[in-house]
Image (cartoon, helix red, strand yellow):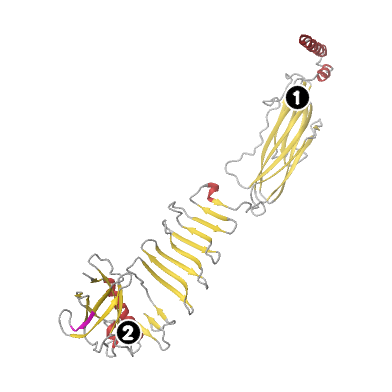
Amino acid sequence: MSRLSAFAVLSAAGALVLLAALCPAQVPQKINYQVMLTDDDDEPLADESVTMVFTIYDHETVGTALWTETQNVTTNSIGVVSVLLGDVHPIDIDFDSPLWLEVEVGGETLSPRRALVGAPYAITDETGGGDDHSLDADDGDPINVVYVDSGGNVGIGTTSPEEELHVQGNVLVESPTTNAEVTIAHGDPQVDAVELRATQLYGGSAAYYDENTNWAVGLGAHPNAPGGHLELARDESGNLAFRLMGDYFGSGEPRMDILGTSGEIVFDLSESQTDAVQLPAGAIDAGEIWNEPGIQSGQSATEIALTGGGSYNQINHGEIYCPGGGYVLAIATAQVNVYHDGTASSAWFGISETNTEFSDLAQEITVSLSGGVPAGSYSLPLTLNAVFEVGYSGNETLYFMARETLGDWSVSSRQLTLLYVPSAYGDIDMNDKPVPDDVTPAGAAMRRPTLEEQRRDAAGPVGSGIATQAELADLRERVLELERKMAVR
């Protein structure tokens, strides 16, 4: 059994209102009527030819038939038919009292009859409300619900329409099918510019087109995840230039893509650390992001002999540009050479902001050999590091300095590296903490003195007898070498 759906009643009423509102003075005796037909399973009767009989009565259930006509129609793909009542027989009746419409489909009468209220009564000039260019509410309040001015502009909810259709209040667009769509177009022939679409599957969306109907912008609910979705085209072929997803495929985090012909930029908060931002190779350099860590380094292999008497010696220096406040980490390395006479040798090494002394902020240490260390020449690896705070933009110069106090010292393989960092991520202790004078650095590289050095040591005040012992040791080694050679033969 076919039946009339609730949507079809609303659609028919809406069509009647529109017809009466646009042509109240010279309205043809016709009513635009639309209905959806479904079967017993509530499935639309799609693309079917049916015979329909329309009859207007003066009573809801019985009464007299005032007008009737038969039309052969075909439903569309969703079971909807649209007919113009009065197309076969003009509706030559007065709409000055309640009337009801009865519809028969394929010999079966649809029940109940539908009251023709409000809009159909405007077909005649004898209605109780409105005038020759407006419609009032069914009960007379409010008046001028639909209004047509002298220029043909239609106002709904306003008597001062500023456009061809001016609606003051809310508008509902509804569809009984999967999709509901509103298209805004321009030109003749028609060129679609905006499409507003509502679907049961994806929700609401909007599409915008350029003057040549090429897709340009897409906006709406994300089709595969919660949240919104925005896309922009960069050319007439619809290739993407920009994409923003409020929830990147169910991650709960947003993602933004900027797409070019040769690269892309990605901000993806579903990723962590450096993976959250992806840039084309070489997109950013020091000139583009100036306030970033930077490094400067200089070295020399030339040996420098320290001057005694407690004077200061500059071993190396470095200059680095600081784009703003922050810190400079200085790292100094060198090979320290000392000829130790068997009594005591010591020297100070440090990194300072001046080259004439160790400044108040200098961070220095003492390297020493005590009197208990055998006399000889020693090479010691030296590494210093120090942190200096800078509170300005400009050049910062630091010096690798040395001060000989006891013994005979020199420095070679000198290097000073400066690293600027803009931020601290923990506590920084820059207090000077020198080691005591009598401490020999752990891991000092001691080598066996050569014969010449041992002979030189023997000439000193503490070297009595050492030269003879050294000569005997050297002779013993030569004898052993000869024995090895003879054994080989």
Quadrant in the rendering for residue 134: bottom left
| Residue depth check, mark 1 versus mark 2: number of the one nearer the observer | 2
Looking at the figure, which quarter contains the N terminus? bottom left
Q: Amino acid at mark 1?
A: Tyr
Could you say which is closer to the camera, residue 324 or residue 209? Answer: 209
**Image position of 125 with respect to 9: above or below:** below
- Is 184 situated above or below 305? below
> Is 376 in front, or is 130?
130
Q: Nearer the viewer, residue 88 or 223?
A: 88
Magenta stretch, overall SS:
strand
Would residue 109 be found to the left or right of residue 214 on screen? left
Q: How many numbered circles does the render carry?
A: 2
Q: Is residue 269 visible?
A: yes
Local crowd size for mark 2, using a 10 Å CA cut-off: few (<14), some (14–19), many (≥20): many
Question: Residue shown at 32%/84% (left/top)?
Answer: 20
Amino acid type indicated by mark 2: Ala
The residue sitting at the left extreme is 62
Q: Residue 378's mark? A: 1
Q: Is residue 457 magenta?
A: no
**Label 2 secondary element:** helix
Horizontal and vertical percent for residue 61?
Answer: 16, 79
Point out the image quarter for the C terminus: top right
Q: Is residue 31 left or right of residue 271?
A: left
In the image, which residues are magenta? 53-58
Q: Position of residue 234 (x, y in %)?
A: 55, 64
Circle 1/circle 2 CB separation < 8 Å: no
Is residue 55 shown in magenta? yes
Q: Which residue is mark 2?
A: 20
